[in-house]
Image (tube, rainbow, N blue to C red):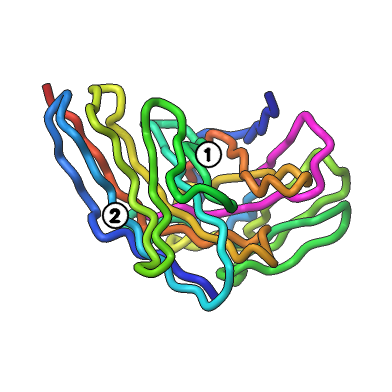
């Protein structure tokens, strides 16, 4: 089975801090995604990447950036964290064989004080 | 662009009773449809998917869903729930021509009581 590992399950940061959320996959899948999950809003796509150094904005990219220097690693960056970025962040990968299924990591719960 | 509406935010149900979670979508083109489940403190995992073919789709853990194109619905059902089915359930849709962009519903929390 494919494994998606998010490096931090729980983080607490202060307003204005720079935050890195890391996601690592153990297979050779091209497509990787970052979502945020909020109660009553479901999952919203922040960014996705379809190859190394390639990225595309999702529905809510403001306040976020991403980095994909190696195929297995996709990082979400909050340049200057704000309280409205307190949320659950989910990384996902997509198999490239047309099955269209996402495999998710366990999530990173970020609290910005 | 596609969108998804899950009609119930909370569904309390007794153990061994049936459950139905409702999902409607809007799209002007051919779609793929999914149900994902999120157990407490875990990421999401796929329950079932509809890509093409039979409109009745069977998934894991005894769940099934029916694609109804005329009503643009993809309701999820289970005839008899267990305590372990307590979780949040998400309906998702993507356009078949652009399948890397999924749109998720707001989620339905199912609480199963003994």
- Which structural element holds mark 1? loop
Vertical order, B99 against A107 (above or below): below
Q: Residue at x 23, y 22 (%)?
A: B83
Q: Residue at x 51, y 71 (%)?
A: B2
Q: Is residue A79 visible?
A: no
Answer with left or right where residue B68 lies relative to residue A82: left
User: What chain letter is assigned to the residue under label 2?
Assistant: B
User: What chain letter is assigned to the residue under label 1?
Assistant: A
Answer with left or right where residue B14 lies relative to residue B68: left
The foreground one among B22 and B84 is: B22
Q: Which residues are magenta?
A: A20-38
| Mark 2 and mark 1: Cα distance apart in space | 26 Å
Report if residue A23 lies within the magenta region: yes
Q: Give the labeled residue for mark 1.
A: A107
Report if residue A87 lies within the magenta region: no
Q: Main secondary structure of the magenta part?
A: strand
Which mark's residue is nearer the viewer, 2 or 1?
2
Q: Which mark is residue B22?
A: 2
């Amino acid at each position: 089975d494919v494994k998606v590992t998010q490096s931090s399950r729980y983080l607490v940061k202060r307003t204005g801090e720079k935050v890195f959320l890391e996601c690592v996959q153990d297979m050779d899948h091209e497509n990787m995604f970052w979502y945020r999950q909020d109660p009553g809003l479901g999952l919203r796509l922040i960014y996705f990447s379809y190859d190394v150094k390639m990225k595309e904005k999702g529905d809510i990219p403001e306040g976020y950036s991403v980095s994909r220097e190696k195929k297995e690693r996709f990082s979400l960056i909050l340049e200057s964290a704000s309280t409205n970025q307190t949320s659950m962040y989910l990384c996902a990968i997509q198999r490239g064989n047309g099955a269209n299924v996402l495999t998710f990591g366990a999530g990173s719960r970020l609290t910005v004080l | 662009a596609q969108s998804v509406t899950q009609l119930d935010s909370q569904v309390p149900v007794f153990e061994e009773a049936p459950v139905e979670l409702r999902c409607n979508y809007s799209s002007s083109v051919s779609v793929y449809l999914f149900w994902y489940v999120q157990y407490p403190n875990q990421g999401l995992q796929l329950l079932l998917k509809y890509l093409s073919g039979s409109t009745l789709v069977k998934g894991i853990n005894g769940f099934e869903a029916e694609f109804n194109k005329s009503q643009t619905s993809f309701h999820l059902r289970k005839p008899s729930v267990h305590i372990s089915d307590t979780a949040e359930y998400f309906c998702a849709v993507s356009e078949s021509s652009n399948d890397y962009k999924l749109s998720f519903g707001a989620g339905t929390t199912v609480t199963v009581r003994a």
